[in-house]
Each structure stands twice: as structure tokens, then as C-alpha cells.
Image: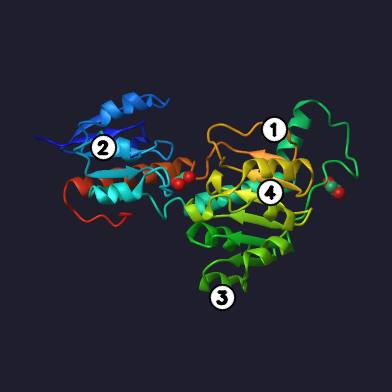
Amino acid sequence: MAKNIFLSRPLPEAGMELLKQSEFNVDIHWDEEPLSRETMLKRAQKAHGLICLLSDIIDPAFMDAAPHLEVISNYAVGYNNIDIDHAKSKGIAVCNTPGVLTITTAELAWALLFAVARRIPESDIFMRNGKFTGWKPMLMLGSSIHGKTLGIIGAGQIGTAFALMSKGYNMRILYSGKPNRILESELHAENVEMHTLLCESDFVSLHVPLRNSTYHLIGKEEFALMKASAYLINTARGPVVDEQALINALKEKRIAGAGLDVYEYEPKLTPGLTELDNVVLAPHIGSASIETRSIMAVMAVKNCLNILRGKPCKNRVI
Ligand code: GLV
Ligand code: GLV
């Protein structure tokens, strides 16, 4: 009997085509809105392959309710939504979509950095409200970017791509964590302790995965170290930042601003966040370009098909 694949949300066409052409039975939840947990569990019962989103919680109870599951293919590079240890104990393969969204996510981090530092969303609202009465010396003054110090926390693929894009802005680059030869040779980046990075950076950008060790990596104490003129950019995962501490820091002008694509209680926002002028908010769109999402869809589908066909898959996390 043919194996079953359950896809928790429609993906870009290129991925769907590949699925339709496969020898497997495909069950697709066609709606853009997520299924309830109960329905998800029911629909996954017969599945041998699951293609899911970063917002789908694939915990032990989920895996136990899907006894045929051979592969969980996440349509994302981050996989903190999946209980890896439990999947391992059950012999379920877990795959992700690394590499293809690296530059796209780095682009969004820069978009947020520019947006908050040069006050683009505020300016846009100002214009739409008909408030522009003429050029003024002090109107919408923001922060320069060139010549400043850029701090990268998590110099992996995305952090490296983000740092490399600073070429042309003549910035001093600091990074914490493991030595990164590319950053050191291309940008003369300095590998420093996080403490130094926080104290000296004008822009701090987060690119770490969410793990126990990175939960609330940035909180009250870290904001206290940052310059009052500094900005925080988070395109990694929400819980890496203590969101209430961030709101306090922004309110008290302990830091100048923040550009966020991810949230601690996604999709909920901590009360108070949307009332602040010095924060730019995006709805978790790091990889959201037409081109990249299409490539990710093909990759997530291929990952699932390869595992079900017993073929090698280079994007296996476990
Ligand atoms: C997006 O957040 C991803 O992990 O792909
Ligand atoms: C800006 O438009 C300037 O001319 O200074």
C-alpha cells in the first residue's frame, strides 16, 4: 500500500507539483489558517511523512499519535518546534531547509536595521497622515549606519551573510561565539565576549537558534550593558529575548530602538510592544520572498520524499 504524506498547510506551487507527481497518497490541509491541535493529531494518524511549519508544535504527544511516522520535514531552517530527542528515540527522521534562506533572512535583518535606524515606518505614517509641511532640519532624525559598530550574536550561516552585507558601510564588526575565518579575513571582524559585544556595538543582531542555552540570552542585564544609542535586531527566534525586558528597555530609552521579526509568544505580542515608536515589527517574514519560499517548498518536499523512498537526504537534522 502506498504511504501517506500529510502537509499541514499549502506551500508554493513548485513544491505542491512535486508532491502531486509522487507515488504517495497526499493529504493537504488547504486552508491558510492552522488546523486545531485535535484535527492535526487526527490527520497525522495515518501519515508516514509529515511536512510541517515552524508554528506546528511536534511534541511527544503528536509523534505518539502518529504511529507510522517515518519523517518530519520542517518547512524552515529552525526546528525548535520539534522535540528532537523524542523523534530520535522513535527513529523518526527530522529534516529542515538550510542554506536557501540564508541571504533572504540576512536581507530582512538589514531591512529592519535600516527601517528602525532611519525611522522609515514612522516617516511613512507621517506622510500618509498629511503631516509633511516642508523640509525641516530636525525632522525624523535617526542614526547613521556607516562607520558604526555592528555586533553579531551567532555567526553561523545567516549571521555571516548578514555581516558580509555590511561591506560598503565601513563598519567595525564584532562577533561572539566560535571563531569565524570568513568574517575575520573578509571584514577583520573581532571575536569578543558577549559582554564586550553588548557594551561596544551600535547595532546588535541576533542569529542564534533557540535552544535551552539561548533562551532569554538577552534580558534586563544585557540591555543594561548596551549603549543608550544602540539598536537590537532579532530575526532569529523570539524567546532568545526576554520580551518584557525589551519593552522596559525601549520605554525607558535604555536602548534607542529595536527591529523585530520574531516574538517570544508568537503570534501573540507582549502588551505594550505595539505602543512604542522606537520599534519596527514584522510578522516573521525572514524567508518570505517569492523565490526563496518556492525553493524551500521544493526542498521540504524532496526531503520528505527521499526519506520515504529510503534514499539519502542531506538535510537531515537527525
Ligand atoms: C524561519 O524562521 C526558519 O526557521 O526557517
Ligand atoms: C536633503 O535633501 C538636502 O538637500 O539636504
Q: Give the spatial CA distance, label 4 vs label 3.
A: 26 Å
Which amino acid type is marked by label 3? Answer: Ser
Judged by depth in the image, the label closer to the viewer, 3 or 2, is 2
Q: Earlier in the sequence, mark 1 or mark 3?
A: 3
Q: Ligand 1: does it lie within 8 Å of the C-beta at label 3? A: no
Instruction: Determine which of the numbered discs, if any, sits on residue 64 in the image.
Output: 2
Residue 17, image x and y in percent? Answer: 28, 36
* On screen, residue 43 above or below 141: above
Q: Ligand 1: does it lie within 8 Å of the C-beta at label 1? A: no
Q: Secondary structure at mark 3?
A: helix
Q: Residue at x 65, y 61 (%)?
A: 151
Residue 282, image x and y in percent? Answer: 59, 38
Instruction: Determine which of the numbered discs, if any, sits on residue 272 in the image.
Output: 1
Q: How many marks?
A: 4
Which amino acid type is marked by label 4? Answer: Phe
* On screen, residue 226 above or below 71: below
Q: Earlier in the sequence, mark 2 or mark 4?
A: 2
